[in-house]
Image (cartoon, helix red, strand yellow):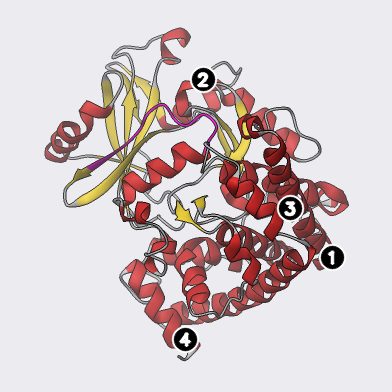
Amino acid sequence: MDRAKFLNQEIAKIDGTLPSPHLAKHLKMALSPFVFYRGSAQLFYADLANRHLPVPEACFSMSLTSVMGDCHTSNFGFLTEEGSHGDTVIFTPNDFDDACVGYAHWDILRYLTSLSLVEAHCKGISEGRFLIDMPGPLKPAVDTHQVNHAQYLFLQEYVATCQRVTEDATVINEAMEQEPDGKLKKFYRKALERSSCGEKFESKSALAKAVHLTQDGLKFKHITDKYTPLSPVEHQQVLAAFAPYMDDDIVDITSRENAGTGSVNMRRFYFLVGPKKPHNAESFRYCHIVEVKQQRKAAPLFYFDNVCPVNRLNPAHLTARSQRRMQRRPDLLLDEVIWDNAHWLIRSRHHAKVGLDPHDIGMGNKARNGDFGYFAKLCGYTLALAHCRGDRRSTRFAKSAVKALNHHTNSALITSANHYAKQVIDDHSWFCDALKNM
């Protein structure tokens, strides 16, 4: 099939429209090949299914496990465990909207491709081709040699972690929870400050930035294109549907607009939960935000729906199940509901969730002198732990990964990922032209 026809078909299948400048999601995807990649996970799996993206045969010998589904550099970061109920800050995968049971190489190959796209993203910014706001002066971007080194470090750490699990199954209870080195240190400290015990909780946490104090108590802010008040009728309908799943009084509800990239066009609501009249710092810490988000089918399952019977669970149930298995200490408030002819995922919003954009890890002398590779290494470690937790009764997955991911397989994965990154860059160029011609 002609590539342009294929792209139009696949984009319309997920987004309900051909590339359109009137769709907020598509405007985001036009920013760079990396952002396009984030917003079009289904293309990755379509290309896997039609063998446009080759996979070493050894990868299929790895045991099935819980996978992220949309694994890339910006879906790793710092957050507090147990959602808004804990204060331990760790570095970990932070997005499970496309999670399911599948092959580990889906996550591995998608992550390796994203490392190459970080280079394209950062170079495009430094050369003025991608109009993305940057704080301060532009800095040099990582180069192809540094990307390749980071890809090898990612795979080496992934395999080494799986090897450690085969020797001691309790390794799956580890997490990256100490202060990291280099550029990542400031992001870790930012997360610490925003936790409920942190010094900036009342000003910089997700809760603090979303609400304000009125005469009637706490309310969500009204911010155009971000927080939109509900009509009285909709408020009552949403309240009636989801109140049983909250763990305290419901203080306020708002519609959350334009959140995410791949799921930017999915409906979601924020619930402010806690004491009705918090007027001091102590009672404010008992409040938290609960997200109720419409869930669609995980991206891999549009093309690989027969891999495992577990994947027949409804989309919200499958996401919650996957998250519980892959996280060391999952959100304490994590559930799913069928309402208004849709599946909805309920989860608490982390007070401290600090993600990393491509330019955070791929630009500057520190990135070029080792920090980019260090970041990839941490991702390899945490992804391996998440995959190994898919089966907590045995170390079968870890053993199969160590056997399959030898030097030859890893080299083939990197070659395939870098070739595919070039395809994504070409697809993004076509996508931008399509938007202009609408």
Magenta highlight on residue 346: no
In percent of width and height, residue 372 lies at 78, 51
The magenta stretch is 327-337
- Farthest residue, direction bottom: 2
- Residue beneath label 1, please? 145
Nearer to us of marks 2 and 4 is 4
In percent of width and height, residue 124 lies at 69, 67
| Cα distance between the residues tagged 1 and 2 | 43 Å
Say which amino acid is labelled 1.
His
- Residue beneath label 2, please? 202
Judge the density around disc 3: few (<14), some (14-19), many (≥20) Cα neighbours within 10 Å: many
Magenta highlight on residue 333: yes
- Residue beneath label 4, please? 4
In percent of width and height, residue 16 lies at 30, 70
The image shows residue 192, relative to residue 67, as above or below, that is above
Task: Evaluate if marks 3 and 1 touch, with contact meaning CB atoms under 8 Å apart.
Answer: no
The mark nearer the N terminus, 3 or 1, is 1
